[in-house]
């Protein structure tokens, strides 16, 4: 028998809070484990409490997959439902069994046809309705909760279950119902059957090709249970694990994968749930095996896909030298290096012109349709080239194709890299909200490595907003997980966020120290690409501390890359670095060149920063008119980004000029006086959410939410939530 599997969470939804119902043993669970526990038990707080108390130490730490079988998830609830079901008449229990078999794990919508074919009397459902267990609905039967449905199925005897599955199979003869008929035929089998296993496997392939991985997984798992050949069983279980992963059921995928010896599968799972270095080794070994086993177009495609995943593993670890290993492997296998692999290898070797051409070719493959992984690689390539509009397009299309094919993990993975483009192009508020949604999705689906990367991105948003406590909390959470799992990309991004925070608050010594440490951090602790992106900020910090020797060396390398890729934004930032490293009036022309190049680019945040630095330099040169113009422009931009600390620096420069620092924003608007994060917390509080509920929705600690609310009250000059509701209502949008 195949036990019903759990459905994937709805995209874009946040997990409900269990803060008030969660028992003490679960209070220490990491958020990523709490979210998955809640998902597995269909959001039932009682079941979540019981399951949390039964987890092993490794499960509670997120190291081992959580239980996935209903009997292990909520045994007490199932026992109580079985007791209630036993009080019902036999005819009622038969109807409930038929309805349960029709609904899950494969929804076949054949209940009414089966009732008519067997001449069953649906009036028998009245006793179930009286007992509050189920009731008749337009499409058949609606159960009181998932546990009642599961109990209705599992409390029946094996013979009765086989009979209802055979009945449902007989009435499923319409167009498009072949796969579901095969499912019920397999569920009604007496024992192993190679013929039925082959039928189910073929139906699963068609479902997979049609973008129905949940149906494909159920069919494949049933085929594995029926096949008499152990080798075929292992292969089918591996396919079922991939389907489970694709639907967002990470725990089931890991449970199924543990029953196989499929090295590439373990590599794919390790990439998103384990150690990225181990993932690289497993994926490159799998690529070699795929290409060498049975040479064909399909095996070559499979090897290329695994090498693309291995490239992602190298990107996440920051061990970009391993990209050269993958390139050499592709050469030995006689296949073209996929995605960003060749471009990364060339960049690591300092062949910047070759890297530009290879990355440009990859970025150009971002048209509609295609493979989500390769579209994501096109977006990453465009990001490396500084082409943020093209990056956003490719990454958006990657997520869209994934949704159309029913693939859940690529959607949140796309959000990881979309955050970079949105951050720099001046859309931090909308981008932060999207990243928070993606973070919930990543946690619920067991993508812990992706969740870590998203946490680091959120630390960057907090740094831009100047929120010290929030940035430090986000960065600490990201670095803690990243350093334990060899994830150099989020570790470096979190370190950069802390440096950016220091820089925004004028703590130049601290910023320079963090960025020097980032430059010296190796794979798993740092990342060459992040170090490169942070170079303009390091130059700024170093100039203020008087330590320009290393800054000049770093700028020279950055300038070489900028000239090779010819990105307007990179060239602008190189010109800004040159201005910072040039004394007196000679810096002015470099600043003007930088702003001219920024006008051709898209990094609005950096353009505002350049204007702020230029305005300060002009003030010191007593060029008051142009200084006021630049500083007012920077002030307006920083206020629109929700970066109050940077706006305060622009105001301070204007005050030093003796100029007013007013902007076009509505005076006295309560919303305008809050940071983006404060406004989000304030709106949730005004809607009646408790601090714990807000913390769960924003993936923060209740202590941080309390800090934000105190800041809101201080800024608005109020004392209570009642005043907050009134003030926000009066302030409008």
Image: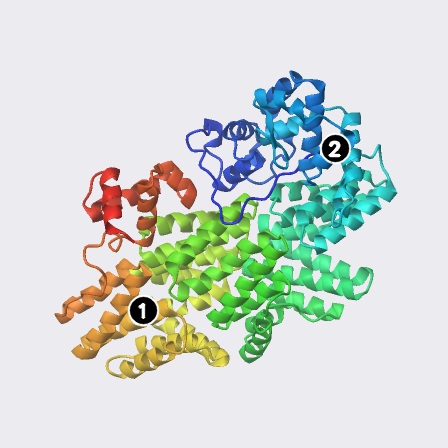
Give percent across and percent down for residue 617.
23, 75
Which quadrant: the C terminus?
A: bottom left
User: Which labelled disc corresponds to residue 495?
Assistant: none
User: Which labelled disc corresponds to residue 609?
Assistant: 1
Q: Are marks 2 and 1 in contact (CB under 8 Å)?
A: no
Q: How is the image coloured?
A: rainbow
Q: Is residue 723 above or below residue 434?
A: above
**Which of the 4 image quarters holds residue 664?**
bottom left
Q: Is label 2 in a helix, a strand or a loop?
A: helix
User: Looking at the image, which residue is at 33% across and 41% down?
Assistant: 687
Q: Residue furthest top?
A: 87
Q: Residue furthest left?
A: 658
Front residue of 494 and 725: 725
Give percent across and percent down for residue 691.
35, 38
Which marked residue is nearer to the observer: mark 2 or mark 1? 2
Mark 2, residue position: 116
Q: Earlier in the sequence, mark 2 or mark 1?
A: 2
User: Looking at the image, which residue is at 59% across and 51% down?
Assistant: 408
Q: Is residue 659 above or below residue 446?
A: below
Question: Would you say 1 lies left or right of 730 here?
Answer: right
Residues at marks 2 and 1, CA–CA distance in whole angstroms: 72 Å
Q: Is residue 526 above or below residue 108?
A: below
Question: Would you say 256 lies left or right of 640 here?
Answer: right
Give percent across and percent down for residue 594.
35, 78
> Callout 2 environment at 10 Å: few (<14), some (14 to 19), or many (20+)?
few
């Amino acid at each position: 028998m195949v036990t019903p599997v759990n459905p994937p969470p709805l995209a874009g939804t946040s997990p409900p809070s269990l803060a008030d119902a969660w028992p003490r043993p679960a209070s220490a669970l990491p958020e990523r484990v709490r979210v998955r526990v809640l998902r597995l038990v269909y959001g039932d707080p009682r079941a979540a409490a019981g399951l949390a108390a039964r987890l092993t130490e490794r499960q509670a730490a997120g190291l081992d997959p959580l239980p996935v079988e209903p009997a292990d998830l909520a045994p007490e609830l199932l026992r109580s439902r079985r007791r209630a079901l036993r009080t019902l008449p036999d005819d009622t229990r038969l109807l409930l069994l038929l309805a349960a078999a029709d609904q899950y794990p494969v929804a076949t919508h054949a209940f009414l046809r089966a009732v008519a074919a067997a001449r069953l009397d649906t009036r028998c459902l009245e006793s179930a309705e009286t007992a509050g267990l189920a009731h008749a609905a337009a499409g058949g039967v609606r159960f009181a909760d998932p546990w009642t449905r599961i109990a209705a199925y599992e409390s029946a005897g094996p013979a009765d279950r086989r009979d209802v599955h055979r009945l449902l199979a007989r009435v499923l003869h319409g167009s498009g119902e072949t796969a579901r008929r095969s499912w019920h035929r397999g569920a009604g089998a007496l024992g192993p059957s190679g013929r039925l296993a082959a039928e189910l496997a073929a139906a699963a392939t068609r479902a997979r090709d049609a973008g129905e991985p949940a149906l494909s997984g159920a069919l494949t798992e049933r085929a594995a249970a029926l096949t008499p050949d152990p080798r075929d069983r292992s292969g089918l279980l591996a396919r079922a694990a991939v389907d489970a992963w694709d639907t967002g059921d990470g725990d089931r995928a890991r449970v199924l994968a543990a029953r196989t010896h499929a090295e590439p599968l373990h590599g794919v799972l390790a990439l998103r749930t384990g150690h990225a270095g181990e993932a690289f080794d497993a994926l490159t070994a799998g690529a070699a095996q795929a290409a060498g086993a049975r040479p064909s177009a399909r095996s070559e495609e499979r090897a290329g896909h695994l090498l693309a995943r291995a490239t992602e593993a190298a990107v996440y670890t920051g061990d970009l030298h391993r990209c050269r290993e993958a390139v050499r492997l592709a050469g030995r296998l006689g296949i073209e290096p996929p995605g960003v692999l060749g471009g990364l290898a060339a960049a690591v070797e300092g062949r910047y012109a070759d890297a530009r051409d290879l990355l440009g070719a990859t970025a150009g493959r971002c048209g509609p349709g295609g493979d989500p992984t390769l579209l994501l690689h096109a977006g990453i390539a465009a990001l490396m080239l500084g082409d943020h509009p093209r990056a956003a397009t490719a990454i958006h299309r990657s997520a869209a194709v994934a949704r159309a094919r029913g693939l859940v993990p690529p959607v949140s993975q796309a959000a990881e890299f979309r955050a970079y483009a949105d951050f720099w192009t001046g859309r931090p508020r909308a981008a932060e909200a999207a990243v928070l949604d993606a973070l919930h999705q990543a946690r619920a689906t067991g993508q812990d490595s992706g969740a870590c990367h998203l946490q680091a991105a959120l630390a960057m948003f907090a740094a831009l907003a100047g929120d010290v406590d929030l940035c430090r909390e986000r960065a600490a959470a990201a670095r803690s997980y990243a350093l334990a799992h060899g994830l150099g990309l989020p570790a470096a991004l979190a370190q950069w966020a802390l440096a950016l925070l220091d820089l925004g608050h004028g703590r130049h010594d601290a910023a320079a120290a963090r960025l020097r440490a980032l430059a010296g951090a190796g794979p798993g602790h740092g990342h060459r690409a992040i170090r490169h992106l942070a170079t303009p900020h390091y130059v700024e910090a170093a100039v203020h501390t008087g330590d320009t020797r290393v800054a000049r060396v770093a700028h020279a390398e950055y300038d070489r890359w900028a000239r090779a890729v010819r990105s307007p934004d990179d060239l602008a930032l190189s010109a800004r670095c040159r201005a910072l490293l040039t004394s007196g009036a000679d810096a002015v022309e470099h600043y003007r060149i930088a702003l001219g190049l920024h006008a051709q680019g898209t990094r609005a945040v950096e353009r505002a920063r350049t204007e702020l630095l230029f305005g300060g330099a002009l003030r010191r040169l007593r060029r008051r008119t142009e200084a006021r113009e630049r500083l007012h422009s920077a002030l307006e931009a920083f206020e629109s980004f929700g970066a109050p600390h940077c706006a305060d620096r622009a105001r301070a420069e204007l005050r030093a000029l003796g100029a007013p620092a007013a902007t076009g924003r509505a005076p006295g608007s309560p919303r305008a006086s809050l940071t983006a994060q404060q406004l989000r917390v304030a709106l949730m509080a005004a809607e009646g959410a408790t601090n714990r509920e807000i913390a769960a929705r924003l993936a923060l600690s209740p202590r941080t939410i309390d800090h934000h609310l105190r800041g809101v009250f201080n800024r608005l000059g109020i004392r209570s939530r009642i005043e907050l509701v009134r003030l926000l209502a009066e302030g409008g949008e």
